[in-house]
C-alpha cells in the first residue's frame, strides 16, 4: 500500500518553483536503467530533449506566470502554457512515470517468460493498484475507469482495481483544516461544533470529514480537496496529451478513434470534478429530479459552506449498498431496495437525462427506512432527449430480438458512422444477444454482453462515445451491486418493463412513431403495415409487469397513448401509418399463415381484460373530449385558470360575459363596395 508520504510527494510543487524539481524522488537516467525498457528510455529522452529545446523560448515569452489553481475549466492550450513554465518538471515526471510503469511491464514479461503468469496474477494485480496510487490522482482515476471495463481488463485485475474506489490513502488533517480556513474564510471551529479529527473516507481527489454545523445543528459531511491537486493534474494531462498527439494517427488508422479527443474529454471531466461548486449544483439538480420520489434520498447542500475546494452536504446515515448482512439486520427489504436502485438509475438515464457517472458501492447507501441514497455528484453526464428516445427504442428492440434495428440504433447513438453497412454486424449482434440471454431473460448479464460486445470493436468500425462509455461503466457498477445483494436478480427484468412503460406513455410523438413501427412491420411489395401480435403481446406483458417496480397503471397508459395520438393528428405529425392501411394490416395479421390467429387475439384480450372495462372506455372518451374542448377554448383566447380542466366545469370558465363572448361566431367582414 502506498504511504501517505508518497502521496504528498506527488504534489508537483515544481510548477510553482523551478528549483523544487530536484526534490522529486525519482531514479535518474543512469541509475536503475535496468528497470526501464531501452525503447522507453530512448523515447522519453528524445521527447523531453525536444520539448526543452523547442518550447523553452516560447514558455519564456508567455508573459506572467499562471498558477494551476487559476484554471477553472480544462483548456488544452492553457494546460500546455502552465506545464511549459517548468520543462524540468515535465522531464522528471516523465522519468518517474516511465521508470515505474517500465518496471511493472518487465515483471509481467518475466512472468510470461517463466510461465508463471497465472500464479502471479494476485501479486501483480495488487502491485498495479499500489503503483497507480503512488503515481497520483490522474492514474487513480484511470484505474477507477478500468475497474469497470471488462473489454480491456481481465476479471481478477478488475477486482483489485475496484479497491481504488474507496480505499485511497488520506493526506494529513492539518492541511485539510488549512484549506477549509482558506476557502471559507473562517476557522473550522467557528463553523462546526463537531468535526472528526481524521477523515472518515478518502478518494482520489479529496477526503471527507464528519461534522456538525453550529448554525443549525445539522450533521454534515465536509469534503476537502487534496492540496496541490491542480498542479499534478496540469503536469500529467500535458504529458498525456503530448503522447496522444504522437499516437493519434496510428489510433485513427487502427482503432478508428481520436486519442487526443479522448484525452481532452478525460481532462474536461477531471476539471469538473475538481471544482466542488459544480458538484453542489449537480446535487441540487438531482434533488429537484427526485423530489417526488419517496424511494430516493439526495442529501441537502449547504451552499453557504461550498467553495471550489470545500463542499458541505447533509450527512447520510446509511449502510453501504453491498452490506447485505447489515441490511438484513435492519429489516430492509433487499429485493425492494434493488428494484428502487435500478428504477432510479433508469429514471436518470431515460427520463431526466442527468445520471450519476460514478455509482460504486461507496457512493450508494441503503437508508434504514429502505430508501436508496446517492452521494458524490462530481462525476455526472447528460443524455439529450433524442438520445434518450433512441435508448428506449433500443431496449424494446432487444426484447423483440430485432437485431437490424439494434444495429441502426448504434448508428443513431454514434457508435457507428452514418451510412455504415450493417449487414455483417447484424449476425454478430444476434449471436451476442442470443448467447447472453440464455434460456430466459433472467439469464441476461450485462457484464457478459459488454465483454462479448468488446470483441466487435476490433472486428468492425465501432467507436464507443465517451458519454456512453460512462453509461456502460455506470450500468456495470450498479449491476455489480445488484449481484452482490442477490445473484439471481436480473437488471434487465426491471429495465424492459420500464422502457415499455415509457414507450407506451411518453408524450413525445417520435416515441409514438417508434411504438407503431414496433407493433406494425412493413411487408409485401407495397410495404403495407402488418400487425405483429407477438410484439404487441410482449409489450403489454412487460408494461403490466412494471406495475410492481414503477407503479404503472395500464389504463392510464392507454389513456395517455390515445391523447398523444390525437395531438399528433391535430398537429399534422406523420405517424407513417394511414388508418386504412392499419385496418388492412390488422385483418391480414389475423389470417397470417393461412389460418385464423384467434389464439393470439384471445391471449392479448386476456392480458387486457382486467383493464378493458366500460370505465376505461369512458375515461378515454372523457380525456379526448376534454382535450378537444380545451384546444377550442385556447384557440379562441379563453383564459383557463383551472389546473385540471374538466368540461363539466365550463360554467366556472365562462362565468364572465367577456369570456363567453369569445365563443360567439365572428361576424363576416363586409366587402368594400
Image (tube, helix red, strand yellow):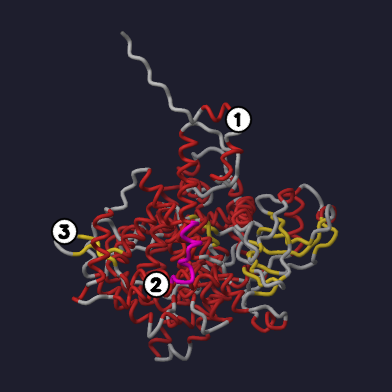
Q: Earlier in the sequence, mark 3 or mark 2?
A: 3
Segment tinted magenta in the rendering? 608-619
Circle 3 packing at 10 Å, graded few (<14), some (14-19), many (20+), is few
Earlier residue among tags 2 and 1: 2
Q: What is the spatial separation of the Cα atoms under label 2 and label 1, in whole angstroms?
A: 47 Å
Alpha-carbon span between mark 1 and mark 3? 55 Å
Q: Residue 412: x, y in percent? A: 33, 57
Element class at badge 2: helix
Residue 134 percent location from the top left of the image: 58, 70
CA–CA distance in space, label 3 to label 2: 30 Å
First in sequence: mark 1 vs mark 3 = 3
Q: Residue at x 53, y 60 (%)?
A: 355
Binning the other alpha carbons within 10 Å of mark 1 as few (below 14), some (14 to 19) or many (20 upward) gives few
Image quadrant where one finds the N terminus: bottom right
Please check the rendered image and state whether residue 562 is part of the magenta-colored stretch, yes or no.
no
Would you say the residues marked 3 and 2 are in contact, meaning their CB atoms lie under 8 Å apart?
A: no
Q: Residue furthest left?
A: 525
How far across and down, in percent of the image, does residue 488 sit? 51, 84
Is 584 left, or right, of 262 in this rendering? left
Q: Position of residue 645 (x, y in %)?
A: 56, 45
Residue nearest the viewer, comparing 510 with 360: 510
From what the image shows, is residue 159 above or below residue 643? below
Placement of the C terminus among the 4 image quadrants: top left
Q: Which residue is mark 2?
A: 605
Which residue corresponds to the image point at 56% horizontal and 45% vertical from the top-left?
Answer: 648
Q: Which mark is residue 175?
A: none
Residue at image point 50% right, 70% down: 546
- Indicate which disc residue 526 carries: 3
Q: Which residue is mark 1?
A: 656
Q: Nearer the viewer, residue 276 or 381?
A: 381
Residue in front for this viewpoint, 461 or 72: 461
Is residue 260 visible in this depiction of the protein?
A: yes
Amino acid at each position: 500500500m502506498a504511504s501517505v508520504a508518497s502521496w504528498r510527494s506527488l504534489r508537483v510543487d515544481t510548477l510553482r518553483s523551478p528549483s523544487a524539481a530536484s526534490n522529486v524522488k525519482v531514479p535518474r537516467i543512469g541509475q536503475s536503467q535496468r528497470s526501464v525498457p531501452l525503447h522507453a528510455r530512448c523515447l522519453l529522452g528524445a521527447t523531453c530533449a525536444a520539448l526543452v529545446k523547442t518550447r523553452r523560448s516560447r514558455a519564456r515569452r508567455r508573459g506572467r506566470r499562471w498558477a494551476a489553481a487559476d484554471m477553472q475549466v480544462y483548456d488544452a492550450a492553457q494546460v500546455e502554457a502552465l506545464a511549459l513554465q517548468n520543462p524540468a518538471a515535465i522531464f522528471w515526471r516523465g522519468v518517474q512515470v516511465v521508470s515505474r510503469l517500465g518496471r511493472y511491464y518487465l515483471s509481467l514479461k518475466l512472468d510470461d517468460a517463466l510461465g508463471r503468469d497465472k500464479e502471479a496474477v494476485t501479486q501483480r494485480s495488487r502491485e498495479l493498484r499500489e503503483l497507480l496510487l503512488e503515481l497520483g490522482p490522474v492514474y487513480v482515476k484511470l484505474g477507477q475507469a478500468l475497474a469497470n471495463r471488462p473489454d480491456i481488463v481481465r476479471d481478477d485485475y478488475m477486482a483489485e482495481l475496484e479497491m481504488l474506489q474507496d480505499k485511497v490513502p488520506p493526506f494529513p488533517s492539518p492541511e485539510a483544516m488549512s484549506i477549509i480556513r482558506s476557502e471559507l474564510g473562517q476557522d473550522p471551529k467557528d463553523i462546526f461544533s463537531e468535526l472528526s479529527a481524521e477523515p472518515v473516507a478518502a478518494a482520489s481527489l479529496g477526503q471527507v470529514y464528519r461534522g456538525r454545523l453550529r448554525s443549525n445543528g445539522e450533521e454534515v459531511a465536509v469534503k476537502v480537496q487534496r492540496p496541490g491537486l491542480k498542479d499534478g493534474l496540469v503536469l500529467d494531462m500535458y504529458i498525456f496529451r503530448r503522447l496522444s498527439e504522437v499516437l493519434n494517427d496510428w489510433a485513427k488508422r487502427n482503432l478508428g478513434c481520436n486519442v487526443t479527443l479522448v484525452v481532452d474529454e478525460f481532462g474536461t471531466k477531471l476539471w469538473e470534478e475538481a471544482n466542488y461548486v459544480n458538484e453542489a449544483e449537480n446535487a441540487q439538480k438531482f434533488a429537484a429530479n427526485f423530489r417526488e420520489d419517496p424511494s430516493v434520498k439526495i442529501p441537502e447542500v449547504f451552499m453557504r459552506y461550498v467553495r471550489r475546494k470545500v463542499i458541505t452536504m447533509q450527512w447520510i446515515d446509511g449502510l453501504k449498498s453491498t452490506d447485505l448482512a447489515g441490511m438484513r439486520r435492519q429489516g430492509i427489504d433487499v429485493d425492494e431496495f434493488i428494484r428502487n436502485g435500478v428504477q432510479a438509475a433508469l429514471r436518470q438515464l431515460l427520463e431526466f437525462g442527468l445520471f450519476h457517472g460514478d455509482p460504486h458501492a461507496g457512493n450508494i447507501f441503503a437508508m434504514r427506512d429502505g430508501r436508496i441514497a446517492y452521494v458524490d455528484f462530481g462525476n455526472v453526464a447528460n443524455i439529450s432527449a433524442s438520445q434518450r428516445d433512441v435508448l428506449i427504442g433500443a431496449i424494446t428492440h432487444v426484447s423483440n430480438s430485432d437485431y437490424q434495428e439494434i444495429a441502426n440504433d448504434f448508428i443513431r447513438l454514434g457508435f457507428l458512422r452514418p451510412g455504415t453497412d450493417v449487414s455483417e454486424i447484424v449476425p454478430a449482434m444476434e449471436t451476442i444477444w442470443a448467447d447472453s440471454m440464455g434460456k430466459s431473460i433472467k439469464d441476461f448479464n450485462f457484464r457478459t454482453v459488454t465483454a462479448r460486445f468488446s470483441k466487435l470493436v476490433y472486428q468492425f468500425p465501432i467507436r464507443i462515445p465517451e458519454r456512453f462509455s460512462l453509461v456502460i461503466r455506470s450500468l456495470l457498477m450498479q449491476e455489480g451491486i445488484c449481484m452482490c445483494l442477490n445473484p439471481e436478480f436480473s437488471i434487465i427484468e426491471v429495465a424492459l418493463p420500464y422502457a415499455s412503460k415509457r414507450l407506451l406513455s411518453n408524450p413525445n410523438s417520435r416515441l409514438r412513431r417508434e411504438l407503431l413501427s414496433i407493433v406494425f412491420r412493413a411487408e409485401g411489395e407495397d410495404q403495407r403495415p402488418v400487425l405483429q401480435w407477438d410484439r404487441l403481446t410482449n409489450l403489454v406483458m412487460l408494461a403490466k409487469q412494471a406495475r410492481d417496480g414503477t407503479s404503472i397503471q395500464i389504463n392510464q397508459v392507454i389513456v395517455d397513448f390515445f391523447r398523444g395520438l390525437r395531438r399528433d393528428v391535430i398537429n399534422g405529425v406523420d405517424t407513417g401509418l394511414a388508418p386504412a392501411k392499419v385496418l388492412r394490416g390488422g385483418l391480414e395479421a389475423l389470417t397470417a399463415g393461412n389460418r385464423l390467429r384467434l389464439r393470439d387475439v384471445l391471449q392479448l384480450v386476456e392480458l387486457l381484460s382486467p383493464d378493458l372495462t366500460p370505465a376505461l372506455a369512458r375515461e378515454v372518451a372523457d380525456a379526448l373530449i376534454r382535450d378537444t374542448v380545451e384546444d377550442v377554448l385556447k384557440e379562441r383566447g379563453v383564459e383557463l385558470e383551472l389546473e385540471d380542466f374538466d368540461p363539466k366545469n365550463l360554467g366556472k370558465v365562462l362565468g364572465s360575459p367577456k369570456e363567453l363572448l369569445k365563443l360567439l361566431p365572428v361576424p363576416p367582414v363586409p366587402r368594400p363596395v
